[in-house]
Amino acid sequence: MNIELLGIFVTVVFQGLYVAFKMGKFEEKLNILEKKQDKHNNLIERTYKNETDIKVLQEKVKVENHRVRDLEDVLK
């Protein structure tokens, strides 16, 4: 009876250690994925900002072109 309980106890301890090891590996992989996700999100944010800046610059170019045309018309 005591040997059976000892065997069960040892089995439970080893299974607990195995699960703890696997959880450590899981957390490590999760941290790596989080870092990759942060890099991706940073890229998306920068891309969005660049697209917004491009739209603003395009609008400024349109305004400047319009002003140039108006000045050309005045000179004619």
Image (cartoon, rainbow, N blue to C red):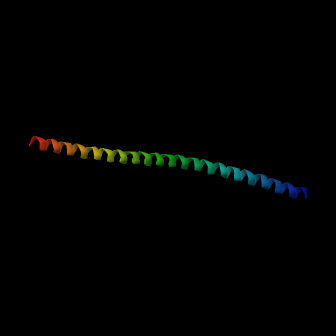
Name the side, left or right, on which 22 lies relative to 45: right
Q: Check the picture and name the quadrant holding the C terminus.
A: top left
- The spot of residue 70 in percent (x, y) is 16, 44
Q: Residue furthest front?
A: 74
Name the side, left or right, on which 55 lies relative to 38: left
Residue at image coords 74%, 54%:
15
Q: Residue furthest right?
A: 1
Residue at image coords 29%, 46%:
59
Looking at the image, which is closer to me, 9 or 48?
A: 48
Residue at image coords 55%, 48%:
34
Name the side, left or right, on which 7 lies relative to 51: right
Q: In the displayed structure, would residue 17 be above or below residue 74?
A: below
Name the side, left or right, on which 39 lies relative to 64: right
- The spot of residue 68 in percent (x, y) is 18, 42
- The spot of residue 46 in percent (x, y) is 41, 45
Q: Check the picture and name the quadrant holding the N terminus.
A: bottom right
Q: Residue furthest left?
A: 76
Looking at the image, which is closer to me, 17 or 33?
A: 33
- The spot of residue 28 in percent (x, y) is 60, 47
Q: In the displayed structure, would residue 23 be above or below residue 64?
A: below
Marker count (numbered): 0
